[in-house]
Image (cartoon, helix red, strand yellow):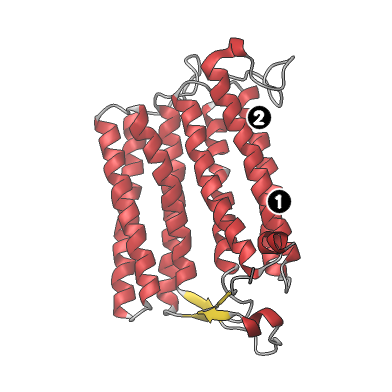
Amino acid sequence: MNLLHRWFGSPGAVRRWALASVIANVGIIVTGGAVRLTESGLGCPEWPKCTVDSLVATPEMGIYGAIEFGNRVLTWVLVAIAIGALAAAWRRVPRRSSLVKLAFGACLYVPVQAVLGGITVWTGLNPWVVGLHFLASIPLVALSVALYVRSGEPDGEVVPLVPRAVRLLARGLVGVAFAVIVLGVVVTGSGPHAGDAETPRNGLDPALMSQLHADLVWLLLGMTVALIAALHAVKAPDAAKRTAYTLLAVELLQGVIGYTQYYLDLPVVLVGLHMLGAGVLWVAAVLVPFSLRKREPSEVAVPLHYEIHGDREGDRIIEPEPVA
């Protein structure tokens, strides 16, 4: 019973499930890339079954079938984590509707992503549909990050920590980060690594698309540097500065990987690392606006048992370890 409460009833349980969701959703971006990079996109030629007669990959399908089916199995891991997060938010004492809504949204969104994966198979890995399937992970990662942050703070009034102009710059930065990822998907659709040897590309000029993508990356870098300067100018909290510096470090590393893979003619290992970097960059970007505000505990809230007997670390309640 204590274990059940710890994982599905305690205030910290939602935060743990949300962190697992962030990691899993970034992970499936990488595994989806592995399917494409190994030309296993049609390793299972049907959906939702692997073949007309088999739900799972058969030995005759070889390594391609195993890789593609393995990626499909990971979708069920996402489903399990989403359900776990929803159960933890629902059973949390006290229950918070904001957390339930975020967790419920993720539960609804995971099947949508799975269906898009099925459509990519039905269309023979059409590059635009494949790109849309990748981009479907982006809102899901943002939902998971939001759930993680919100589960560690109260439901009280939002208190800005920096002037409005700085907050608008941070929101614009998130928009540009999303545009960078979208254009990166377009670049991928114009180049090699289609997921299957017979799959056509989107017909756009890879060199031109890569140049536009790089231009947006430089814009993102410039905005991040400007944000860091602004945070120092307005004497923002150290946590906000650390978040911005983390984003800058991720951008620089991702840029190094991107330029290196381009000049080395897109080796699969670097392309895979670049896809991982895209997921990590998105997490880092989404965290920036959250770091520029805080929530105060509601004045009308009545202290509950866990608040009385727990320790507070900022806005988080640190629960004491249960006595054996």
The x, y position of residue 307, in whole percent, is: 64, 82
Q: Look at the picture and state if 293 lies above or below 141.
A: below
Q: Look at the picture and state if 177 lies above or below 96.
A: above
The x, y position of residue 268, in whole percent, is: 37, 28
Q: Nearer the viewer, residue 203 or 95?
A: 95
Residue 120 as seen in the image, left or right of residue 292: right
Among the 4 quarters of the image, the one containing residue 213: top left
Image disc number at residue 118: 2
Q: Is residue 42 visible?
A: no
From mark 1 to mark 2, how far is it between C-alphas? 21 Å
> Looking at this rendering, what residue extends furthest in the front direction?
324
Q: Amino acid at mark 1?
A: Ile
Q: Is residue 91 visible?
A: yes
Which residue is located at x 66 percent, y 29 percent? 118
Q: Nearer the viewer, residue 35 or 286?
A: 35
> Looking at this rendering, what residue extends furthest in the bottom direction?
299
* Quarter of the image that includes the N terminus: bottom right
Q: Are marks 1 and 2 in contact (CB under 8 Å)?
A: no
Among the 4 quarters of the image, the one containing residue 46: top right
Q: Look at the picture and state if 193 lies above or below 152.
A: above
The x, y position of residue 155, in whole percent, is: 64, 76
The x, y position of residue 192, in whole percent, is: 40, 24
Q: Amino acid at mark 2?
A: Gly
- Secondary element type, mark 1: helix
* Quarter of the image that includes the C terminus: bottom right
Image disc number at residue 83: 1
Residue 169 as seen in the image, left or right of residue 8: left
